[in-house]
Amino acid sequence: MAKSDHVSDAQQRLDRFATYRGVMNERIGEIDHLGIKRFFALDSAAYREGALDPKTKELLGLVASAVLRCNDCVDYHLLQCADAGWTDDELYDALNVALVVGGSIVIPHFRHAVATIDAIRANEIGREAERD
Amino acid sequence: MAKSDHVSDAQQRLDRFATYRGVMNERIGEIDHLGIKRFFALDSAAYREGALDPKTKELLGLVASAVLRCNDCVDYHLLQCADAGWTDDELYDALNVALVVGGSIVIPHFRHAVATIDAIRANEIGREAERD
Amino acid sequence: MAKSDHVSDAQQRLDRFATYRGVMNERIGEIDHLGIKRFFALDSAAYREGALDPKTKELLGLVASAVLRCNDCVDYHLLQCADAGWTDDELYDALNVALVVGGSIVIPHFRHAVATIDAIRANEIGREAERD
Amino acid sequence: MAKSDHVSDAQQRLDRFATYRGVMNERIGEIDHLGIKRFFALDSAAYREGALDPKTKELLGLVASAVLRCNDCVDYHLLQCADAGWTDDELYDALNVALVVGGSIVIPHFRHAVATIDAIRANEIGREAERD
Amino acid sequence: MAKSDHVSDAQQRLDRFATYRGVMNERIGEIDHLGIKRFFALDSAAYREGALDPKTKELLGLVASAVLRCNDCVDYHLLQCADAGWTDDELYDALNVALVVGGSIVIPHFRHAVATIDAIRANEIGREAERD
Amino acid sequence: MAKSDHVSDAQQRLDRFATYRGVMNERIGEIDHLGIKRFFALDSAAYREGALDPKTKELLGLVASAVLRCNDCVDYHLLQCADAGWTDDELYDALNVALVVGGSIVIPHFRHAVATIDAIRANEIGREAERD
């Protein structure tokens, strides 16, 4: 596996996750359970403007996801963090806090996060190239 | 990925898990470690008739598996719960408790559980059609 | 520590917890954070009548609390479970599922739960004696 | 327990924790284990100026501690967060993210955190009154 | 709190835990639930002579308890480890593995463990002095 | 899936993990974050000769990884444990401690570990055959 491979692998993984997440969230909407719908709404609301701005909250969500070792959650918050304008170095610095708090058991999720960041940036470059 | 896809994907995933689980449990039996064999026996016994009935216990196993975020365990207990006669709405209501207790970190496992439930019901319909 | 002691110790512990919980929940209400208020409301709602009845849901909450190893949560759900009519033997059977799923690391919380159950029953007897 | 009590209780708890933490960290220093000393140094370094500023990192440490449900760690990071200038409303907003990510199992630690915040602010007022 | 205090505090804590543990284990025996009794028996058996000797297994139990962050379990296994002949330096080296694997969230439990080790050694010296 | 299949499946899985791990660790090195580099160095150092020998420490790392339910970490430490000379029976006995401490939620990771052990031994036999 050459270096470029981990990027394209992560891009395909993110694409599959986006599709799966969309299909399942729609399916969950059909279930129409009031408590579940409210929980999903509360989850979205937690990252909106409040005493803290959404950018800071997404970074909190990323670190919480990393120490709780949930790859899908890490990916979701990394996408939001990149949209919110956090740079790679800032994301690495946040993930370093997660590594120290959560220990070496977080390392596999850290590797996953680094691959996801590379894939997000490659997609951004791809989209910019298309616009030119 | 269309809606029908998540069902057939989950059916294939459950089939692979059933095969793998069978092969590995047989292999673990060959190891013949007394403590390990007793642990597996104790695990099975925990869901048998007692002061609580097996149906209730399987639902407890499902919620415990969901908050501890173990997809294989969630799948196993969903299969048992469906056999025991829990309806979809009852399973969603139990999973809602798991979501609230365990938080949004449980969401990826909730998506997994919903796909598994759909696959189990599709298999049941398939088996009934064969019988007709 | 004689046997009667673990009961009176647990009764005092439950009393302190009830007082502290009441004071802090009132204090949290004063904070008046919409997300936090909604989360507390959603938590209460999860155990109300739905596809499952409240009695079953409290038992799910108990097992989830035990495997996640939260003594305060175990105490809270044991009080609700006793109110809902679960017997000691049924509670032990549910906690046995938690022990097997969560392992020996759950044992200290199981000891705590047994002391709490004894204190709840002693309080019930005390209240009945007062009524006579 | 009146409202003022939860504040003085938390102040005494924080004092005891500060003393115990100081004594034990000195004792751990005497052990003179290179790996342990380096781990403690790395832990301190994780919250220093980097791509992210220390103020942001302390908030990350707080949320990580809350979702991992460690009261001592929550107290430590709340003290650092207050020193770094986060307001109560900002701390509540960060803890709301922790509640939603980590679920109702985090509630006892949220109560603990709110009592600690009240104690920290009461101490700040006390120190200011002494200066006047 | 002077340095000697953390030792006597930990000695009193260990005494209280031993008494409480004895009372509650006897109470749990009275419950007479077959699954629970078998689980306790299996837990004891896991540390007996097998392919690995009991001394090694107690160290495994200690590290497992530390990374899962259970103070009562850490204390129990430290008492067994001291009986089995592990030295302080060996215990610190094992706890260092737990710190690195489990992260800074383990630090409060590491402090607890160091205080327990000091209390165990002080008790051993006390018993030897009595014998002379 | 015949019995030989779980071995070749696990061999392919270990090969993919080794490649991915190598690529990502190199990528993480490029990031050149001082805290992250030190954490990785500290993680490696924790298993080197100290008061305990590396062989014992790898077994501690294995059990810690199993109870924290991290398959990648289990695989890594199993490879190190096999290199260090632990036999299958000793590894099973260590994993039995993990099962009892961590509960049935560890079973999927135990299955994974058994498949990995079989793959490691098959690779060893393959390498010996090549040398003949």
Image: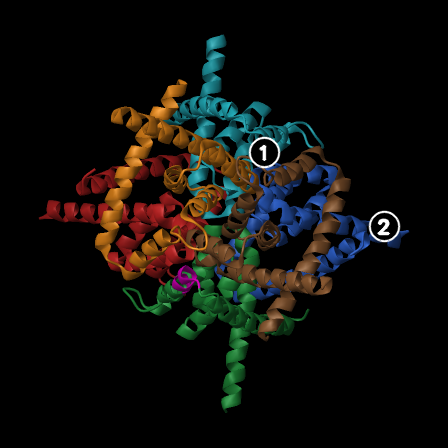
Chain colours: A cyan, B orange, C brown, D blue, E green, F red
Q: What stretch is highlighted in magenta?
A: E33-40
Callouts 2 and 1 close, C-beta under 8 Å: no
Q: Where is residue B116 in the image (x, y as percent from the top left)?
A: 39, 32
State the residue lying farthest toward the bottom.
E132
Q: Is residue A28 above or below residue E108?
A: above
The residue lying furthest to the front in this view is: C132
Whole-angstrom CA distance, mark 2 to mark 1, is 34 Å
The residue tagged 1 is A59
Q: Which residue is drawn at 72% across and 61% down?
A: C131
Camera-side residue of C45 and D107: C45
Principal secondary structure, stretch drawn in magenta? helix
- Number of other residues with Cα within 10 Å of mark 2, as a class: few under 14, some 14 to 19, many 20 or more: few
Label 1's element?
Answer: helix
Q: Residue at x 59, y 25 (%)?
A: A84
In the picture, measured across the screen, residue C73 lies left or right of residue A68, that is right
Chain letter for mark 2, please: D
- Amino acid under disc 2: Glu
Q: Nearer the viewer, mark 2 or mark 1?
A: 1
Q: Does the magenta stretch include residue A46?
A: no
Answer whether residue C79 is visible to the viewer in this image. Answer: yes
Q: Give the number of the disc on residue D128.
A: 2
**Chain ID, mark 1:** A
Q: Could you tell me residue F76's position as x and y percent?
A: 34, 47
Looking at the image, residue F78 sits to the left or right of residue C8; the answer is left
* Three-letter code for the amino acid on which mark 1 is drawn: Leu
Q: What element carries label 2?
A: helix
Q: Which of D53 and B36 is in front in this view?
A: B36
Is residue D120 visible in the rendered structure shown here?
no
